Image: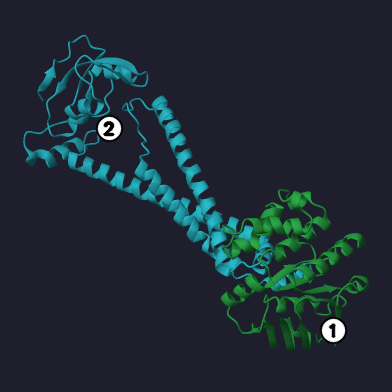
Chain colours: A cyan, B green
């Protein structure tokens, strides 16, 4: 790898870093800037930026090994070693050779990449399932609240019919109430997501050694409006049964109970 | 004005069938206040529900302003209720979460007239002597006042037929007399027809005519 700008480590052993090409672009850092790293957020000076390599190295932050070991309290230890073979034909033989070494696990970049891709895909499915379950529970909550509300006010609906309300009036009225409930829930949910995301981000920065600067969780307008609309639609769908129950109320038996 | 003939109403209660009304005939004229007298369970409320298009008879004919209503579809029945009928219930049955004025305006809202006819509820409240209490909630009114608000609500859309089901049942004797006196005034002022169910014979004496129900049968006084 060659440097695009700046210089190699000075050899002092601490407080220096060289950024991969993409890391420098993403973090908007240049030679001479300082970057907090590690669990103690120690500032390091950017000495250089590597040229684009087209590999995962472009996204890395490089530190002198002794400094990195000290920073993460792993003196004399290594977590991983990257090996680049001159010929791809030797990959299998190399893996077999490494396999025989105790306490060493060797994986190729292809395996690593597929593991990451699978992890991301699994995480996405898990998140979607969680969202689905949460939506289902939310819809059940709305259904329960509105069914109870309608059951408690059957007499009121009967009375409204007696003074001129049509079934569609009562259907619309109940659905409107459900919509208000859904909208309120959606707005509160979005607000809690924003506040919760901010809190989670603050927590992550406290406990995780290196978290990139900038916002980790961004709630953009399109996502927020989309979520609110989806929640509103779900609430309305859940409110169809209670609304139908209110619309089909028979006033005579209900009013007879009072008379 | 309103006429029922050969009216039957049966209910199924578990295994047995209850005949709530048995071949009832009744004619109501405009500008007439008729007391429907009978003990509990005699069929008064059932008769009012049928005449008010809230329920359908098992058989028989109901005419309101010349229109046969017993076989109308729900949408048409709603229109008849909106235009021709006003209801007053025993416990006033006001919506507790809205003001007296808003309660009175309910029938107009359902008829889609609330925007163009904002003064009507205010005038109606004034007519029942509650002009100053429009902003009060039902819980802030006395029993007699609540019942007068209910009467204003029943008349705000200018119906031709007012049906009152034991409107004085929860009131003391003085307030009961006031309500019946108010009915008399309204009958004269609007030339509407009032059918008021009661088991209070003294109050029934204030009506132009009394009809008696016993075990679902009209005992006398059915024709106008």
**With B67 as the anchor, is A50 left or right in this view?**
left
Q: Nearer the viewer, residue A55 or B71?
A: B71
- For residue A103, which quarter of the picture? top left
What label sits on residue A237 in the rendered view? none
Name the residue located 78 percent from the left edge and 57 percent from the top edge. B146
Q: Is residue A157 depicted above or below A31 in this figure?
A: below
Residue B133 image position (x, y, % from top left): 75, 50
Q: Secondary structure at mark 1?
A: loop
- For residue A37, which quarter of the picture? top left
Residue A113 image position (x, y, % from top left): 22, 41
Callout 1 environment at 10 Å: few (<14), some (14 to 19), or many (20+)?
Answer: some
Task: Find disc 2 in the rendering and name its residue.
Answer: A103
Residue B122 image position (x, y, % from top left): 69, 55
Q: How many marks?
A: 2
Can residue A80 be spotted in the picture? yes
Q: Is residue A9 depicted above or below B224 in this figure?
A: above
**With A92 as the anchor, is B108 left or right in this view?**
right
Name the residue located 43 percent from the left edge and 48 percent from the top edge. A228
Q: Chain of mark 2?
A: A
Disc 1 + disc 2, Cβ < 8 Å: no
Q: Nearer the viewer, residue B98 or B187?
A: B187
Labels 1 and 2 positioned on one and the same chain: no
Q: Secondary structure at mark 2?
A: loop
Task: Find disc 1 in the rendering and name its residue.
Answer: B215
Residue B205 image position (x, y, % from top left): 91, 74
Q: Report the mark closest to the observer, 1 or 2.
A: 1
Classify the position of the C terminus of chain A by image quarter. bottom right
Q: Chain of mark 1?
A: B
Q: Nearer the viewer, residue A110 or A142?
A: A142
**With A242 as the anchor, is A113 left or right in this view?**
left
């Amino acid at each position: 790898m060659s440097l695009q700008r700046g210089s190699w480590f000075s050899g002092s052993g601490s407080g220096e870093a060289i950024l991969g090409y993409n890391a420098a672009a993403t973090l908007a850092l240049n030679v001479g800037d300082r970057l907090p790293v590690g669990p103690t957020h120690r500032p390091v000076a950017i000495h250089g930026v590597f040229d684009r390599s087209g590999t995962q190295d472009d996204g890395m932050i490089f530190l002198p090994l002794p400094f990195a070991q000290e920073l993460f309290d792993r003196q004399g230890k290594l977590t991983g070693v990257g090996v680049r073979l001159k010929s791809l034909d030797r990959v299998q033989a190399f893996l077999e050779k490494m396999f025989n070494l105790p306490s060493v696990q060797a994986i190729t970049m292809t395996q690593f990449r597929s593991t990451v891709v699978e992890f991301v895909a699994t995480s996405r499915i898990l998140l979607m399932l969680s969202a689905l379950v949460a939506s289902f529970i939310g819809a059940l909550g709305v259904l329960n609240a509105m069914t109870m509300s309608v059951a408690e006010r059957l007499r009121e609906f009967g009375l409204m019919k007696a003074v001129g309300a049509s079934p569609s009036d009562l259907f619309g009225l109940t659905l409107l109430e459900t919509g208000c409930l859904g909208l309120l829930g959606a707005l509160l949910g979005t607000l809690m997501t924003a506040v919760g995301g901010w809190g989670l981000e603050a927590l992550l920065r406290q406990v995780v050694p290196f978290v990139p600067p900038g916002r980790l969780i961004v709630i953009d307008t399109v996502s927020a409006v989309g979520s609110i609309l989806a929640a509103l639609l779900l609430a309305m769908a859940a409110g169809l049964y209670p609304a139908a129950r209110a619309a089909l109320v028979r006033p005579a038996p209900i009013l007879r109970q009072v008379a | 004005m309103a006429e029922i003939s050969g009216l039957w109403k049966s209910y199924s209660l578990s295994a047995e069938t209850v005949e709530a009304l048995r071949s009832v005939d009744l004619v109501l004229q405009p500008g007439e206040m008729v007391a429907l007298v009978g003990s509990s369970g005699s069929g008064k409320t059932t008769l009012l529900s049928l005449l008010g298009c809230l329920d359908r008879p098992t058989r028989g004919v109901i005419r309101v302003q010349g229109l046969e209503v017993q076989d109308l579809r729900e949408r048409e029945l709603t229109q008849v209720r909106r235009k021709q009928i006003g209801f007053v219930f025993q416990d006033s049955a006001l919506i507790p979460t809205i003001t007296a004025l808003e309660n009175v305006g309910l029938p107009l809202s359902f008829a889609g007239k609330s925007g163009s006819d904002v003064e009507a509820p205010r005038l109606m409240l004034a007519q029942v002597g509650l002009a100053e209490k429009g902003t009060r909630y039902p819980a802030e009114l006395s029993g007699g006042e609540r019942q007068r608000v209910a009467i204003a609500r029943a008349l705000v859309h200018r119906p031709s037929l007012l049906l009152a089901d034991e409107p004085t049942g929860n009131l003391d004797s003085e307030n009961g007399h006031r309500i019946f006196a108010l009915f008399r005034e309204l009958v004269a002022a609007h030339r509407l027809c009032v059918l008021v169910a009661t088991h209070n014979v003294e109050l029934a004496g204030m009506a132009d005519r009394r009809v008696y129900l016993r075990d679902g049968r009209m005992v006398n006084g059915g024709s106008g």
